Image (cartoon, rainbow, N blue to C red):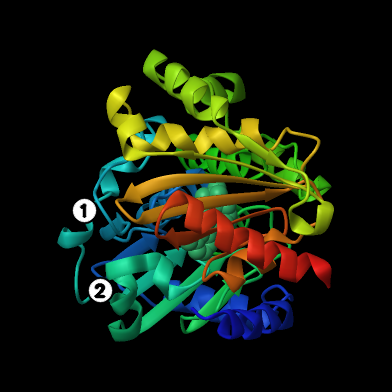
Amino acid sequence: MTESAGASAVAEASATCEGPTEADWEAAVAAVRELPPHARVLLVCHVNPDGDALGSMLGFALGLRRMGLRHVQATFPGPHEIPQPFQTLPGVELLVPAEQAWTDPDLVVSFDAASAARLGCLADRLLTAPQCLVLDHHASNTRFGKIHLVDPNAAATSVVAEELLARLAVPLDAEIAECFYVAVATDTGSFRFDMTTPAVHQMAARLIATGLRPGEISRRVFDSRPFGAIRLYGDVLRRAQLDTEAAGGRGLVWTYATLADLERHGQQAYVLEALIDSVRCAIEADVSCVLKQVAEQEWAVSLRSRGATDVAQVAVALGGGGHRMAAGFTGYGSARSVINTLRATLDRLCAN
Ligand code: AMP
Ligand code: MN
Ligand code: MN
């Protein structure tokens, strides 16, 4: 995306800050209720899925199964590698590799993807399916479906998914609740971030009341990594750079992790997701960034703000998306050139 296209996408994003209307909810409920038991429902979530993408999708998938729908598939684009912390999520047996996903489902539901591009090779299913529903909570959502339940005020997509299941009169059970709990705990940084409203804690209370064990789930999802990952974190954090002049003087702290780092320590890419949480602690920088190499000249870039900078605006300008305090984009070229482009964009946007 060019920078000027990025700027217009920012304008679009701010124009869609309202949550779903009652008519949107009714349309979504009708789209699901009208399905016969033999209908094929394909659920999709964003590439490189995180806890919210997988948790909201699998929790909803289980809800559809409880409604008597017999054919429910869940999938995501890219290699069929389920990050280890999510391999024990209830409903994981409904996941199929993207190549095996039905090409002609009766309904497609998208989870936690702000744009069709985030669905990679699965994006075309939304165009061809007779009905499609988009569940999301990114302000930058481009409204690429037919029915949209997009709530930028929701802490996680699972908040939207839980409400839709409630409106469909599907009771929460411990399996559905575990999926939604992992999702909301992931996106709120274990209930630490600003979007942790009373409503989020009320949702957590409903989920925990089904009997799930938050300590056990958190240990499994957040606090279990192979020892090699700890050594890898050491290497990557040691090369972190602090640039207090960047972002119009607000400061930028950044580091990068290469495919060679992963190989040297025998680790899978999911372990890199935790790095940004260490890097963003640096009080000298409002903006933090981790570049995660995906291919020779391609980087998945995570951005975080300590409050002054709207990193969603920065990410959108660079072809990505996200939220005010947490966003990302795909960078191309060397790590140095991606950082230089980021710095130029930060300088331009932070000067305003
Ligand atoms: P992450 O840094 O991967 O945890 O992502 C932070 C936020 O930015 C999440 O809401 C992501 O969905 C979003 N995000 C990350 N990468 C991209 C991208 N390439 N395009 C759009 N949104 C992204
Ligand atoms: Mn996500
Ligand atoms: Mn999310």
> Which residue is found at the position 70% from the left and 72% from the top?
19
> Which residue is found at the position 52% from the left and 81% from the top?
2
Horizontal and vertical percent position of residue 70: 26, 58
Question: In which image quadrant can residue 130 be found?
Answer: bottom left
Q: Is residue 65 left or right of residue 57?
A: left
Question: In which image quadrant can residue 153 be found?
Answer: bottom right
Please, which residue is most extreme toward the top here? 227
Residue at label 1?
97
Q: Is residue 209 visible?
A: no
Horizontal and vertical percent position of residue 116: 42, 74
In the structure shown, which secondary structural element does the residue marked by tag 2 occupy?
loop
Q: Earlier in the sequence, mark 1 or mark 2?
A: 1
Horizontal and vertical percent position of residue 48: 39, 51
Front in this rendered view, residue 297 or 155: 297
Residue at label 2?
105
- Residue type (three-letter) at the residue carrying disc 2: Pro
- C-alpha span from label 1 to label 2: 15 Å
Q: Is residue 173 left or right of residue 299?
A: right
